[in-house]
Image (cartoon, rainbow, N blue to C red):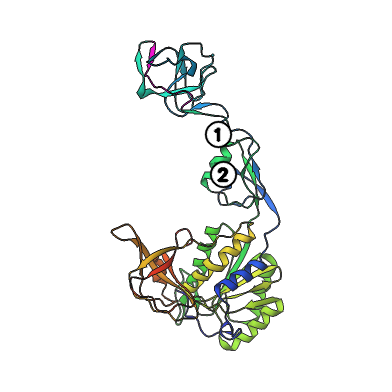
Amino acid sequence: MSRKQPATCMDEFDPHARTVEQALAHIRALTQPLRGMERVFLRDALDRVLARDVPARMDVPPERNAAMDGYAFAGRDLGAGGETRLRLAGQSLAGHPFTGTLGPGECVRIMTGAVVPEGADSVIMQERVEVRGETVVLPAGTGQGENVRLPGQDVRRGDVVLATGRRINAADVGLLASQGIAEVDVVRRPVVAYFSTGDELCGVGQPLAPGQIYDSNRHTLYALLRRMNVEIRDMGVIPDEPEAIVAAFTEARNTADMVITTGGVSVGDADYVKQTLEQLGRIDFWKIAMKPGRPLAFGRLGDALFFGLPGNPVSTMATFILFVRPALQRLMGMEPQAPLTLRARCLNRLRKVPGRTDYQRGILSQDETGRPVVSTTGLQGSHVLSSMSRANAFIVIPREAGDVEEGAEVDVMPLEGLL
């Protein structure tokens, strides 16, 4: 677990904490999509962001094909009222189409996805027919033009199948493959440099010295950044020494598109750190009216965005999800989407101080009627990392609200896909 957050310059720099909405708007205004793209093979395209529109090269399906197993025939051969008898002329299989033209009074056995032969315009499912040797009997009431997929029914040649700014998912990979596309142009991945500060932090796997704790935040950040599919530069733990901090900020500023730090410094060093950051760039705000995550810093270091995340582990994750994630999406050329929220009945009484937006850890489930309910994970201290591990949602309590009574409806933000 990372250290308890001490008093820092972040607690005193801005006496007027910004609301979550104000902070998001400010960050968005200062975040512009990256320039530069690269071409990648389709198998490497998952979770990359398209740098340009992808037009369809061909119709999908490219030819008429059967929507089910059955028999292909011409509607003109249907009887006026009773059953229809047709001669079986062959078969059409996926990858092995019937090569002739269907003559009057003929049909072919056909499989799902197989090409509908010339001369046919209808397919009847196999369960509805009676086969007597080479004769296929269609029942009265058989329809014409049914169960045939037309060329371009899914995708038309020239249509934009995937647009610029789309993050490619597994279904998109399949769609691109269906067009015979082997490579795509994607936005280059943002370079994110990050480090922790503090002499008390110890690397995972190393023995703890007296007064030390393990640096969990760097590993949490690494996992969160991996999920975002960015280029990661882990700069390690920087000691609480002015020269080391200046060197770390300078290197990060010169090599990354975004710089993230976690943890505070002692009050005595705080003014120096503030001056260092202002010398190398600028800090726009230090406080957010939210819990956990109040001491969040944002600004610029040269051309790089800067986020100073709180040292407490839950605060680190909350501020990453709410602020860093949408900034990274914007850098990658995406239109950031606010995390999904839904309404659920709260099973506990929750304490809340008006004047800040709370993101309390919760467990989202369903009651016996199938309606969503949410319960607290218990202690809500921003140092209680285990509560974040147990949680599958944030219970979002608005800034102006006070305590939440048991049974009240609350906003819930599922964490699936965010952690």
Mark closest to the chain's N terminus, 2 or 1: 2
Badge number at residue 153:
1
* 138 to the left or right of 48: left
* 395 to the left or right of 149: left
Give 335 or 149, whichever is nearer the viewer: 149
* 262 to the left or right of 90: right
Considering the numbered disc 2 on the image, is that residue within a helix, a strand or a loop? helix
Q: Residue 401 location, x and y as percent?
A: 45, 77
Badge number at residue 43:
2
Give 264 or 299, whichever is nearer the viewer: 299
Q: Specify the segment rendered in magenta.
A: 134-146
Q: Name the residue rendered at 46%, 12% in the picture.
A: 106
Q: Is residue 137 above or below residue 35?
A: above
Considering the numbered disc 1 on the image, is that residue within a helix, a strand or a loop? loop
- Residue 414 in sight: no
Q: Is residue 209 above or below residue 95?
A: below
Q: Name the residue rendered at 68%, 65% in the picture.
A: 255
Residue type of the residue flagged with mark 1: Gln
The quadrant holding residue 241 is bottom right
